[in-house]
Each structure stands twice: as C-alpha cells, then as structure tokens.
Amino acid sequence: MAKIGLVTVLFKSDEVLDGFFKSVSRQTHKDYILYLVDNSVNEQSNKVIADCLAAHPISAYQHIKNTDNVGVAKGNNIGIEAALKDGCTHVLILNNDIEIEQETAFASQLLLMEKGEKIIVPKIYYPDRTIWMAGGEMVKWRALGIHYGYNKADSEAYNLPKYITYAPTCYMLVDASVFKKVGMMDEKYFAYYDDTDFVYRSCDAGYKLYYDPSVTIIHKVSHSSGGDSSFYIFYSNRNKLYFIRKNFSGFLKYFAIGYTFFTRIFYWLRFNKDQRKKLVQALKNGMTYPV
C-alpha cells in the first residue's frame, strides 16, 4: 500500500492553513503523514494548527519546529528526510497556501504512479480560477521555468495530460526512489530556484514530469514574501545566477548570465532606491556565491 509523506514548510502561514488542512483531511486516501516543518519561530502557529486539526482531523502528522527560519529548501529537506525515514513510498511537496479541489486527488495520482510515473504535478489556478500553471517548460537560455497558460482563462487546451520539463513544487508528488538518484533540495538556495534546480536535475537524470490536469489546485500566490519585496528581489536574482553557474556550461552558461544582466536593466528602471541596492547586491552575490 502506498504511503505518502506530505511535506509543507510553514512561514507566516496562519491565515491560509484552515483551507489547506480542510482539503488534505477530506482526501479519500488516508495512508499519509503530514509533516509540518515550521520556520515561523513563534508559538502562535501551535494554536493555529491545533484549531485546524480540531476542525479538520488528520490522524498522522508531525509538527517539526525549527529554532530559526532555515529557508524553504532546508525545510523541505527536513520533511522529506523524515518521510523517507518513516517508510513513505511517495513524497508530496506542498505549499500550504493551496487548496486541493478533488477528494480523490491522492488516490488518482497514486494510480498513475502504479503505471510508472515518478513525478506528477496538477493544474493550478489563481483563486479567481484563471490559470497559474498548466504544466511548464524550462527555457535554458533564459534560465527560467515558464508556466503554460499563465494568467489565461481555462480551456480544453489545458486539459491534455502530457510530459513537461518544468513545474514548481507547490504541489509535486514524487516517488521516493527519485530522491535516492537525484538527491535532495540544494539548501544553498534558501528560497526561490530550489525547486527549479531539483526539477532540472531530475530531468537531467532521465525522469519525466507528468502533468495531470484531472487534479486541480487553488493557489493563493505570494502570501508570505511579496512579488517586489527586498527578500524576493535578492533571492530570486542571486539564485538565478547561482543556478546558471551550477548547472550550465560553455556558451549556454555565459549567454544565460549575459541575458540575466541585460534584462535586469529593466528591473532597475522601475525599482526605487532601496530595491536597486538590493538588486545590485543580489547580482554581485550571485556571481561569487560558491558553487
């Protein structure tokens, strides 16, 4: 019997947890353990989790409290390692700002795993049901994973199951054997591009990502960090350069670095003084960060 380790990293997550717990608790497949890896470093999350469990019971869970914000990549690793130690046959990496729409999501995707799939992702909507991601593609020369259907109205065109080369890990079901071959998340990323790196390494190792549009997710995007926050500006830009330097070589590597620096000009033009300072810091760090 398949046993899933559900891994989610908590950070400023209190306001979204009720919907997350509700959608997990109603799943028909019950053989799972929920690993709540808590980077919040406060006691409030204890009460929020207790309230969510009272309203939406989950029989098997572990609340792993970190003494500091160790980042998304390390937080995921803590949960993944716990799941593998507990004998989980599959790991489902989850954001907690999501809600799973189908009660049979776990069960139906485990059937796909039985047929040989190793990594599965769903269709993901914004709360207004425009598409956030309907599969994706890794564009190497831009060092960027793009989302199919991004910001578009849903249509039958996005209901075709297929193999893809990119997806974020806000909901990703992974066979446990993948981690043994590919390894864990690279903790140097802290946040942003850690999932891009994992997916890239998985594809490079010969695994295929399967897009399953029969399972749909509502994603409350960027509730914790913000699109133009100093945190986002620094880590997204630093990590993009780190990703290029780590994974690419030859002409592709230098073209992707050049493209990144050229396109940051347009960010610079719309940023304020503090944002510009953070961008420069990120670019410098990204070119010197140990690979």
Image (tube, helix red, strand yellow):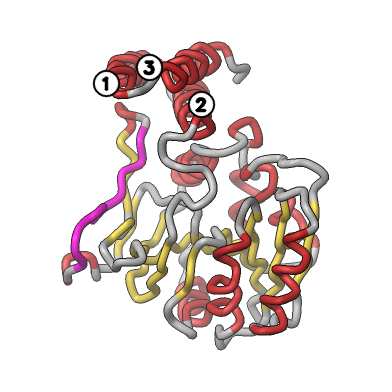
Left or right of residue 214, residue 198 in this image: right
Look at the image and say whether residue 215 sits in the magenta stretch: no
Left or right of residue 16, residue 164 in this image: left
In this rendering, is residue 104 above or below 209? Answer: below
Mark 2 surroundings: few (<14), some (14-19) or many (≥20) residues within 10 A: many
Between the residue at mark 2 and the residue at mark 1, the CA separation in whole angstroms equals 16 Å
Toward the viewer: 63 or 105? 63
Give x and y (percent) for residue 25.
61, 82
Q: Quadrant of the N terminus?
A: bottom right
Type of amino acid under label 3: Ile
Give x and y (percent) for residue 159.
24, 70
Q: Which mark is residue 78?
A: none
Most extreme residue toward the bottom is 28
Q: Nearer the viewer, mark 3 or mark 2?
A: 2
Query: Disc 2 marks which residue?
Result: 234
Query: Disc 3 marks which residue?
Result: 257
Residue at position x 64%, y 77% in the image = 2
Mark 1 surroundings: few (<14), some (14-19) or many (≥20) residues within 10 A: few
Type of amino acid under label 2: Phe
Query: Disc 1 marks which residue?
Result: 266
Look at the image and say whether residue 147 sits in the magenta stretch: yes
| Quadrant of residue 87 within the rendered picture | bottom right
In this rendering, is residue 267 above or below 121? Answer: above
Between the residue at mark 3 and the residue at mark 2, the CA separation in whole angstroms equals 16 Å
Stretch in magenta: 144-154
Residue at position x 60%, y 74% in the image = 21
Toward the viewer: 98 or 174? 98
First-in-chain label (3 vs 2) = 2
Type of amino acid under label 1: Phe
Toward the viewer: 57 or 18? 18
What predominant SS class does the magenta segment belong to?
loop
Mark 3 surroundings: few (<14), some (14-19) or many (≥20) residues within 10 A: many
